[in-house]
Amino acid sequence: MEQKYSLDDLRYLMARLRDPDFGCPWDQKQTYKSIISHALEEVYEVIDVVEIFDFMNLRDELGDLLFQIIFLCRLAEEDSFFNLDDVIHSLTEKLIRRHPHVFPDGSLKSGFHKKLNVHLSSVEDNWEEIKKNERKHMGKAGFLDDIPHALPANKRALKLQKRASAIGFDWKSSAEVLYKIFEELGELEQEIDSGDNSCIENELGDLLFTVINLSRHLQIDPESALRKANRKFTMRFDSMEKLAPENDITKLSQDELDEMWLLVKSLE
């Protein structure tokens, strides 16, 4: 039976790649910043295979993502900041601390207690309270201080809204948010008529922020919803290309494109 490599083997491989004398030139020149771009790319590739249930490739994509984590840990270890063991220890401590309903003794070795009738909402409330105490301990006084600015704008908007909702600053229902969307649309129309691009951008941002708020109230991930819309558009457009004369969609008029789009939709 083929021997399987372990996490320790992967760490050894990483050290060999980074060896200043005998390592790989590409790996030697990488920095925190360069690896971040690769890590983001790998995250999106994991998302792609999960959303199409391509579990044959999920293993490989998770491996690629894990390698970016190992790489960043190696860079930090070389700079004497921390190593992978420190990351695992810190993560385990944090998860134990944030799950007192599972580890009531505050230890990984906490015994299995009788299952408590804990509701999801109370778990989420407790999670936010624990994170609030952690923020105070880290010296982050502002309620929104620890929400990363580097997040994609839609993800950050969602986190901001969830955090504000935790203290009661929120719409009471999705119907109220929907009404706000119509209000924002009206304001956007006014600014479009004015022709002031700066004001148009502001109102468009308000509209997008409110649409994300609606998705949160409907318990739909806006990023996932938009990715599905992108895939649907791509599939329909591909079908239009196949139906076009000589598969050349560029020769069609606007009216012909519209008619073909409606035809493709009707065939779904």
Image (tube, rainbow, N blue to C red):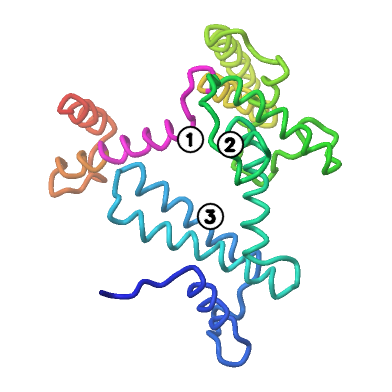
Which quarter of the rendering shows the C terminus?
top left
Q: Which residue is painted at 35% across and 49% down in the image?
A: 49
Q: Which mark is residue 40?
A: 3
The residue under label 2 is which amino acid type?
Answer: Lys
The residue under label 3 is which amino acid type?
Answer: Leu
Q: Nearer the viewer, residue 243 or 183?
A: 183
- Residue 20 on the magenta span: no
The residue under label 1 is which amino acid type?
Answer: Glu
N-terminal of the two: label 3 or label 1?
Answer: 3
Residue 267, percent from left and from top: 15, 28
Name the residue that disc number 2 marks. Answer: 155
N-terminal of the two: label 2 or label 3?
Answer: 3
- Residue 230 on the magenta span: yes
Which quarter of the rendering shows the N terminus?
bottom left
Say which quarter of the image contains residue 113.
top right
Query: Label 1 near label 2: C-beta < 8 Å?
Result: yes
Q: CA distance from mark 3 to mark 1?
A: 15 Å
Q: Is residue 151 above or below residue 193?
A: below
Q: Please report the bounds of the magenta region as a residue range.
A: 216-236
Residue 154, percent from left and from top: 57, 35
Q: Which residue is painted at 55% across and 21% down in the image?
A: 118
Name the residue that disc number 1 marks. Answer: 223
